[in-house]
Image (cartoon, rainbow, N blue to C red):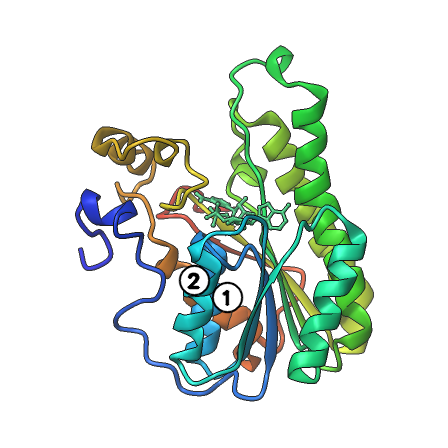
Amino acid sequence: QPHQPGVERLMNPPAEHIRADYRGSGKLKGRRALVTGGDSGIGRAAALHFAREGADVAILYLEEDEDAHETVRLAKAEGVRALAIRGDVSNSAVCDDAVGQCVETFGGLDILVNNAGVQYVSEDLTDITDEMWQRHMDVNINGYFYMARAALPHLGEKGVIINTSSINAFAGNQSLVAYTTTKAAEMGFTRALALQLAPKGIRVNAVAPGPVWTPLQPASWGPVDPQAVADLGKKTPMGRIGQPSELGPAYVYLAAEDSSYVTGQTVHVNGGMIING
Ligand code: NAD
């Protein structure tokens, strides 16, 4: 299994973000992308696969640590321009400013990936505080709206918006009620916006990942527990958790002209968890 490294490799050193076998063919050359949450996990994989395809990439991230700068270094190593912007997507002024910085630096914006998200686990509805509920709405729903609204005036014909939703929007998750609510809302947002923007030639699609090894997973909140990782993977028909790198090509597909007749749709990348999603 080439994309199932040993457990020690999963977090330290971190998960695989770009497929070792991924050969770019310049299909995003000249395109400019902004990926929220592009410092880590799935967003980082999307950003680095875009870079390998020749796109300039900006990432928006929340907390100052090495990840954002490392992502920029890795993107630049692909021979493209790269930019890290720190800010909170739950603030609309921050989103306007991030788009502004991207446009100023790259001269425009063609691809927006709404991906920054939060997830708090609670087994019982009564354990969800007002603050936890509100934070899910602010980041996972409002953030997607603010970013799309800020980006829209800059997206020309062939502009693309990709929203990272989740398998939970389709299958539900008893321990993630607030999160699941937001991921389903993102699907509604994707479909409505796709209809509104189709006449302009702007395409809006979603990616719905299954379990992927990123810091978002509860098993990664503490020291790596091999059993916890294995348990997450066992829920999938393929019997293993996905690597962020296995999501990257789905984002490239939706960003590139390969998907020129695809809008309002969902690409499921989940080890077979939903066959008829
Ligand atoms: P991650 O924790 O690796 O990365 C998320 C990043 O989002 C963080 O590094 C942070 O910089 C950024 N972020 C969080 N809140 C932010 C805010 N308010 N403003 C700006 N940036 C913020 O997580 P991930 O697993 O790569 O998650 C990315 C997306 O994938 C999320 O939307 C998540 O819901 C979705 N997803 C993940 C999985 C999974 O199993 N990991 C499964 C389905 C869907």
The image quadrant of residue 114 is bottom right
The front one of 167 and 47 is 47
Q: Earlier in the sequence, mark 2 or mark 1?
A: 2
Amino acid type, residue under disc 1 in the picture: Tyr
Mark seen at residue 251: 1
Q: Where in the figure is residue 155, as x and y percent of width and height?
A: 74, 76
Query: Relative to 108, is 13 above or below?
Result: above
Q: Say which residue appears at 52% left-offset and 87% top-offset.
A: 29
Q: Say which residue appears at 55% left-offset and 48% top-offset.
A: 63
Query: Relative to 242, is 199 above or below?
Result: below
Which of the two marks, 2 or 1, is nearer to us in this view?
A: 2
User: Within 10 Å of the Cα at label 1, are there few (<14), some (14-19), or many (20+) other Cα atoms?
Assistant: many
Q: Say which residue appears at 31% left-offset and 44% top-offset.
A: 241
User: Within 10 Å of the Cα at label 2, are there few (<14), some (14-19), or many (20+) other Cα atoms?
Assistant: many
Q: With 95 as the anchor, is 23 left or right in this view?
A: left
Amino acid type, residue under disc 2 in the picture: Ala
User: Element type at marker 2?
Assistant: helix
Distance of label 2 from label 1 (alpha carbons) = 9 Å
User: Element type at marker 1?
Assistant: helix
The front one of 97 and 126 is 97
